[in-house]
Each structure stands twice: as C-alpha cells, then as structure tokens.
Image (cartoon, rainbow, N blue to C red):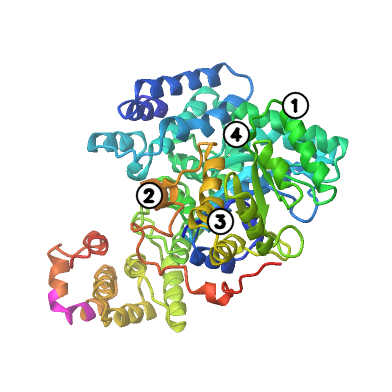
C-alpha cells in the first residue's frame, strides 16, 4: 500500500531538521489528534516557520520522484521547509478527519497569511479532491498576489487534471497579465485548445496596438491551433529582431497544421533545420531565457 | 540612511506613498491594526481586514522593496461595541501568531470607558501569554491622564515596560513615559499630534534612548515621509547622526524585534523563499521587471521639511 502523503513529507523534513525540531512537529501532530478544538492546529501552523525555519527544501532527485509518485506531475522543487511542514500537517488532517476536511481547509484559507496561502495552495494536489477545493482554487486564482497565483498554477498537476476549459484558459491568460511564466504550468501543451489560441492572439494584438511587448511564451499555446490570421500573427512575429521571439514563432509554426505555416518556416532554413533535428525546442528556449545563452 | 516607520496605516495609502517612502530610505514599516474611519459592525469584516494586512498589504509593500510588518488588536473605539469586541477577542489569537506580527496593538483608550478598559486588559493578558510586545495608542483627548492610566494598567497586569511602546506622545507625556521605562513613540502627524520641529526640540532635550519617530499616516491628512523628513531636519539642526539613527531606525527594530518576527536580515539579506515570493524590491533573483522605485521623492516634495 502507498504511504500517506503526510508520511512522505515528514520523511523529507526529518532528514533536514534537528531531532528537537522533528519531535516538536510530532508532538504538535499528537496534540492536534487528541484535541477537540482547532486551537492547536492554528498554533501549529503559525509556529512552523519559527520552529522549523524557512530554508529551501531542496529535494534530491529520488525525493522528487517520490513526489511524482504521490501525485503524478507534482513538482515541489520550489517548496521551502515551512511550506512542506504546513502541507504535511494539512495532509495529516485530511487523513485524520476526512469527513470535515473541506470545512477545515476552507477555514484555514480564510485566515491564512501570505506564506500560509502559498503553502495551502501548493498542497492542493495532495488533498482529497472536492467541490470545496475547486471553489478555494477559484478564489485563489482571482488573487493579485503573484506568488499565491503561482502556488496554484506552477509545478502543480491540479489545474490540468481538474480545470474545465474556461478556467484553464483564464489561468493562462491571467499568468500573462501578472508577468508570470507559462513554462512551469503543468500540462501546458496537452491542454492547449482552439479557444485559448484565439484568446492569446487577441491579447497579443491588443498588446502590440498599445506598443507593449508580447511574451514569446504565448505562441506555444497558439501553434497547434493556428489558422487564418493567427498564421499571419506568427509570421509577423517570425520577422522579429528579437532572437527568442523569432524562434518561438517558428516553433509555433512548426506545430501548426496549416500547410502555409511550413512554407513560412522554410524561409528560415537554418532554424527550421534545428527544429527538425530536435536541437531547438520550447525547453531549450526556456533554458536560453534563464541562462542567457543562445539556444 | 535607512529608516523604519513603526506606525503606518499603509492600507489607506497609495502606491505613490510607497514609492516616495522607498525613495526616501524607508526599508520597513509596521502597520498597526486600527479603526478604519468607519465603524466595523461584523466580526467578518474584522477578519478580512486582518487578513488584508497580513496578506495583500505585505505583498504590496514588498513590490516597492519595503518590508511590511503589522500588529493585531482590537482598537479602543471598537471596544465599545461589546458584541463585536467579544467576537474579535475570539479570533485575535489566530492572527497574533501570523508571520510578521510584531505586537498586539494598537490598543488602549479613546474615551476611557469601562469597555475600553476591559478589552485593553484582556489584550494585555493575550500579549503576555503569547510573549509579544504591545503598542499602546494614547488617547487624543485627556491625553496626559489617559497615558498615565495606560501605564498604570500595564503595571497592574505585571507587564514588562521594555516590551511596551507608548505611542502618540507629546511634550506633556514624554517624561513620565521614559521615566517609567517604556518606549516613547512620537507620531509626526500634521496639525494634530506632533510636528517635526517640536520633535527635534524633544530630541535635543531627551536624547535618543527609547525614543522612536513614526508617521502614523492613515486616511487623514498625514505624511508618509514623516520619519524621513524628521531625520533630515534633525540632522540639519545638529542632532548627532547616531541619535537620528536610533530614533528613526534602530530603536523601532530593538523594540519590535522582541517579537522575534522582525530582523535586519529581512531587508539586508532576505531568504531565498522571500525573494521568490514576497519581497521583490531588492531581489536579484527576479528579472524582467523595471525597478518600481522612481524619483517620486521629487514629486512628493521631500525637501519641504517642516511638518506643523
């Protein structure tokens, strides 16, 4: 039988915490188990950063694969120790009192500070799915606090598994509006759709009309569904002097079904060749973005 | 010079203010929970207010490179609504342990009613239990007696004066507050509480020990550059630099740092997780965005030094 999520998370924490810290967490969990009120729960969640610190969790490869095993697509690479500990406590509650978990987690979200919100939302893929979670996620997506938005949208399988098309599309669009990257969205390619491609092209044209830059990332979601004027948008972007924008547009044209797109691509033989032999990909572009080296 | 504004209701202020404060050298602010100008009538609005100052306002400040802390408490005016006050006391312990909460406050007296007295005392007990400092709001009316009484009550409850900041002092209250071992804060608030020329006089007379300057800027006509301007004026009038640093930076850090929730490293050497999430201003990890702090000090006429 699979180990419960709270056990796996605690294991990660144990190897990083002192004996005193570990036994503090264990004794708090015991108190929560025995207590009839939620006072101990609030105190525990509040005290976690003070008692356990806020270092990066920095999971190793084996632990990252354990995360993926817990929930496919879960990637806790950016979690900190306090985030992981808070999620462990919440997962423990879900295991302890599944019947009132929806109520508990809703209450916790309502009273959460910034770091707690990030933790609560980062853990969503590990909690038992319900309408209450969906409602909380909907509320969280409406935030203007980028790190809270990213706790939902980035490195989490939750959106790809549970969002309907409208929510998915608006999450992607909102990411652009708040300068949040698209690449860390799990399932970005799989959930691409014609409606999103249309929305993103409209957005790109709106930005251009206002003389504002358009992130190269959005073309990734446009490519597979590009038709008609969208091909024109991609062609225009392919003329860009900006190296990354140009490559992104050509990658998108490569993904586009229309025959015309291949004609445009062929007029950039060097880049087309690199796309064909797999040395230029969306991932390599992202690496170029982060390292500054030309892909 | 770096400044801390240890009393600023940023929830009532604009981004212009954040820009101007950052440009003037403010690295951290403390946002006491307070009366929002309109009485709250439901505990729910109180919860949302507290959530806003521990959440969105913190994030907003971070975008301008300013670290945001807060104090939580039931203010004296709203203590007079017994039903609300009871409900707020129920939820306060939940918020008192949140990250960046550096004190219980601002609490104390307004009209010095029985209910105000009751909830002031209950909150002192809460602060004692949670080992948090206390920020005391001294009343605008009957200030001298109200200030003495606030300290009397603290002592009745066995509070340690070195963990209590008595705010909104003036020439009439300062001596007693300092003599009794409390921190004395001064709100540089145009026309009503304290002007910065008067403040410089006080610094001349009393020195810098256990004194701190704040702006108490809020929804009224107030001055978010109160601390920075007072520092500048004080230097111009010959107050030693070390004293100016104490009253405009160090003392606030020492007093509220007793909560364990406020460290100089928060702004000088922020943790990796903070740089990724809530503190963009000085971050080297976040690229792709223009610096937010512009030359707004000029726009805000930071050189007009005198606050009456």
Q: Is A217 drawn above or below residue B117 in the view shown? A: below
Left or right placement of residue B54 versus residue B221 in this view: left
Marks 3, 4 in one chain: no
Residue holding disc 3: A142
Q: Position of residue A106 (x, y in %)?
A: 60, 39
Q: Is residue A1 visible?
A: no
Q: Residue at x 38, y 27 (%)?
A: A10
- Residue A63: which numbered mark, if any? none
Residue B238 lies, in percent from the top left, at 54, 63
Chain name for mark 1: B
Label 2 sits on residue? B269
Q: How far, Cα to Cα, is label 1 from label 4? A: 17 Å
Q: Classify mark 3: residues with Cα within 10 Å, few (<14), some (14-19) or many (20+).
A: few
CA–CA distance between discs 2 and 1? 40 Å
Along the viewing direction, whichever of A134 and A66 lies nearer the viewer:
A66
The mark tally for this picture is 4
Are both tags, 1 and 4, on one chain?
yes
Q: Quadrant of residue A276?
A: bottom left
Q: Secondary structure at mark 3?
A: loop
Residue at the image point whose x is 47% and y is 57% from the top: B2
Q: Can residue A102 be seen by looking at this rendering?
A: yes
* Chain name for mark 4: B
For the stretch drawn in magenta, what is the main secondary structure?
Answer: helix
Q: Percent x, y for residue B287?
A: 35, 63
Q: Are marks 3 and 1 in contact (CB under 8 Å)?
A: no
Q: CA distance from mark 3 to mark 1?
A: 48 Å
- Please report the bounds of the magenta region as a residue range: A264-270
Instruction: Return the residue at label 4.
Output: B132
Asked if labels 2 and 4 share a chain, the reply is yes
The chain under label 3 reads A
Q: Nearer the viewer, residue B88 or A213?
A: B88
Q: Residues within 10 Å of mark 2 (few under 14, many from 20)?
A: few
């Amino acid at each position: 039988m699979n180990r419960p999520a709270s056990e796996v998370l605690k294991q990660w924490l144990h190897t990083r915490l002192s004996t005193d810290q570990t036994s503090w967490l264990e004794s708090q969990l015991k108190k929560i188990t025995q207590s009839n009120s939620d006072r101990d729960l609030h105190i525990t969640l509040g005290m976690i950063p003070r008692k356990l610190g806020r270092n990066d969790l920095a999971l190793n490869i084996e632990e990252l694969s354990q995360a993926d095993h817990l929930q496919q697509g879960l990637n806790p690479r950016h979690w900190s120790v306090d985030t992981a500990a808070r999620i462990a406590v919440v997962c423990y509650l879900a295991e302890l009192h599944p019947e009132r978990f929806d109520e508990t987690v809703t209450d916790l979200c309502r009273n959460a500070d910034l770091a707690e919100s990030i933790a609560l939302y980062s853990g969503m893929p590990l909690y038992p799915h319900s309408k209450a979670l969906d409602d909380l996620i909907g509320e969280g997506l409406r935030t203007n606090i980028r790190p809270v938005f990213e706790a939902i949208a980035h490195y989490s399988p939750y959106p790809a598994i549970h969002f309907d098309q409208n929510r998915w599309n608006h999450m992607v669009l909102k990411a652009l509006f708040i300068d949040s990257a698209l690449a860390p969205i799990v399932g970005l390619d799989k959930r691409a759709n014609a409606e999103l491609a249309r929305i993103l092209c409209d957005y790109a044209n709106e930005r251009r009309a206002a003389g504002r830059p358009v992130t190269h990332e959005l073309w990734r979601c446009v490519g597979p569904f590009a038709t008609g004027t969208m091909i024109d948008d991609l062609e225009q972007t392919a003329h860009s002097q900006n190296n990354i924008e140009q490559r992104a547009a050509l990658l998108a044209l490569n993904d586009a079904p229309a025959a015309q797109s291949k004609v445009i691509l062929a007029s950039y033989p060097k880049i087309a060749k690199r796309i064909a032999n797999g040395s230029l990909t969306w991932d390599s572009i992202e690496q170029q973005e982060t390292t500054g080296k030309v892909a | 010079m770096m400044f801390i504004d240890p009393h600023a209701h940023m929830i009532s202020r604009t981004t212009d203010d954040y820009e101007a404060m950052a440009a003037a050298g403010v690295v951290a602010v403390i946002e006491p929970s307070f009366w929002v100008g309109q009485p709250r009538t439901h505990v729910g609005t109180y919860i949302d207010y507290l959530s806003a100052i521990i959440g969105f306002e913190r994030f907003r400040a971070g975008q301008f490179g300013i670290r945001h802390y807060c104090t939580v408490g039931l203010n004296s005016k709203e203590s007079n609504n017994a039903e609300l006050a009871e409900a707020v006391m129920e939820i306060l312990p939940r918020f008192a342990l949140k990250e960046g909460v550096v004190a219980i406050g601002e609490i104390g007296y307004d009209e010095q009613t029985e209910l105000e007295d009751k909830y002031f005392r209950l909150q002192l007990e809460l602060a004692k239990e949670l080992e948090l400092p206390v920020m005391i709001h001294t009343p605008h009316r009957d200030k001298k007696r109200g200030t003495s009484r606030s300290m009397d009550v603290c002592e009745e409850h066995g509070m340690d004066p070195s963990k209590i900041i008595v705010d909104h002092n003036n020439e009439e209250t300062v001596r007693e507050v300092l003599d009794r071992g409390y921190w004395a804060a001064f709100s540089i608030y145009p026309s009503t509480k304290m002007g910065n020329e008067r403040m410089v006089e006080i610094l001349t007379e009393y020195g810098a020990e256990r004194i701190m300057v704040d702006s108490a800027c809020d929804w009224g006509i107030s001055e978010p550059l109160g601390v920075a301007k007072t520092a500048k004026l004080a230097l111009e009038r010959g107050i030693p630099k070390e004293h100016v640093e104490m009253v405009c930076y160090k003392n606030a850090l020492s007093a509220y740092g007793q909560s364990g929730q406020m460290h100089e490293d928060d702004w000088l050497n922020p943790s990796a997780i903070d740089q990724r999430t809530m503190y963009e201003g000085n971050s080297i990890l976040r690229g792709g965005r223009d610096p937010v702090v512009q030359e707004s000090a000029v726009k805000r006429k930071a050189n007009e030094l005198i606050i009456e």
